[in-house]
Amino acid sequence: MFESIVANELNSFLEIRKALISQKTLKADKTALESFDKYLVSVNYSEKFLCEEVLDAWIRSLKGKSKTTNGKVLIVKNFAKYLSSMGYPSFLPYVPRMKSDYIPYIFSDDELSLLFHYADNLQPRVSSTCSPHLQSKIPMLLRVLYSAGTRLGETLSLRQKDVDFNTHTIFLMEAKCSKERRIPIHETLALMLEKYCLSIGIMYTPEAYLFPGSKTKKDCHFTSRQAERWFSKLLRLAGIDQRAKSWHERGACLHCLRHVFVLKSMQQLEAAGHSVDVNDLVLPSYLGHDCLLDTDKYMKFSGTLVTSSLNAFEAFTSGLIPKVEVPYEDE
């Protein structure tokens, strides 16, 4: 499999990794190490230890998204640690930070109205044997994503018991990075969820999924792929272009509703006279973010569309990174 001077060490490293990681991760590690191995062969590298020069040159040769580069460098860094433990002191490369160039599609109010209209009037062509209650499920799912700003995966994982109709809260147990959180929702959404649970017959079944999947399979929920497929149909009906505008734009999709939630939350806070500043962690906490920078990623949209919100968020994050004056030196 490997042909470089460290071929044996690469094989033994993968054998150790095999017992610790999933098959999917192992496959990704193997791909990254094979690429690194080929590079070492191409430059005729003949040392058992990895020096800084060869690692830097390899990193500069990598192409593609920053996330992909980050993953490859991280696995090679772990291999360098392994080599050092085997008696071949190796340089540990700096892992480049991932950069997100993704720009979401921000639905206009008119587009949102159209989407909800077609969702409320959805007419599935086939019987709901494989996906029951579609006519109720799709409209409710969209309203939760839009009104609560939750992620698609954690929303689909909700069970009936996770909705507290008295306190108007939702408990997200299967959230990203296994970080549970309870979030408040508007009383209107809570009332809609209550009527929805009654209509599909799960009001008194605490363990039932809020958005059930197949009738033939017990204890399964509606999948992300199914939700995206039906949302694509709604986009077509509403005449909304789903194509990405450039290489870093995903185009209109369900995840964009979370971005719309962040935008409208900022607008609502400002309109209510709540001056959002760097010490305010209400929105990041609600979204399940660790820091302000995570929330900042959700504010990537055209400033020409929502100038006031963009200015508000710039004020929100101002002062996070102090300016450093570099003295000018005459040559």
Image (cartoon, rainbow, N blue to C red):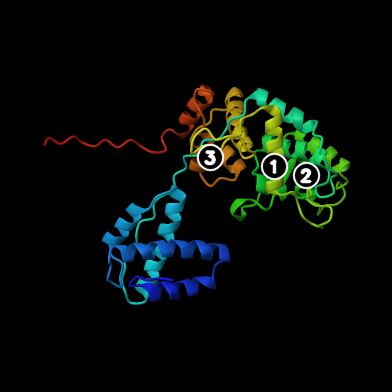
Closer to viewer: mark 1 or mark 3: 1
| Mark 1–mark 3 distance (CA, rounded to whole Å) | 27 Å
Return the residue at label 1.
Answer: 229
Query: From the viewer's perspective, is 187 left or right of 225?
Result: right
Name the residue: 54% across, 37% down: 298
The tag earlier along the polypeptide, 2 or 3, is 2
Instruction: Look at the image and tell me in which quarter the N terminus lies.
Output: bottom left
| Image depth: mark 1 or mark 2 in front | 1
Q: In the drawing, what numbered circle is on residue 164?
A: 2
> Compared with residue 117, is residue 21 higher up or lower down, i.e. above or below?
below
Q: In what quadrant of the picture does the C terminus appear? A: top left
> Which amino acid, mark 3?
Thr
Which is more toward the observer, 72 or 290? 72
The CA span between labels 1 and 2 is 29 Å
Whether residue 91 can be seen here: no
Residue type highlighted by circle 1 = Arg
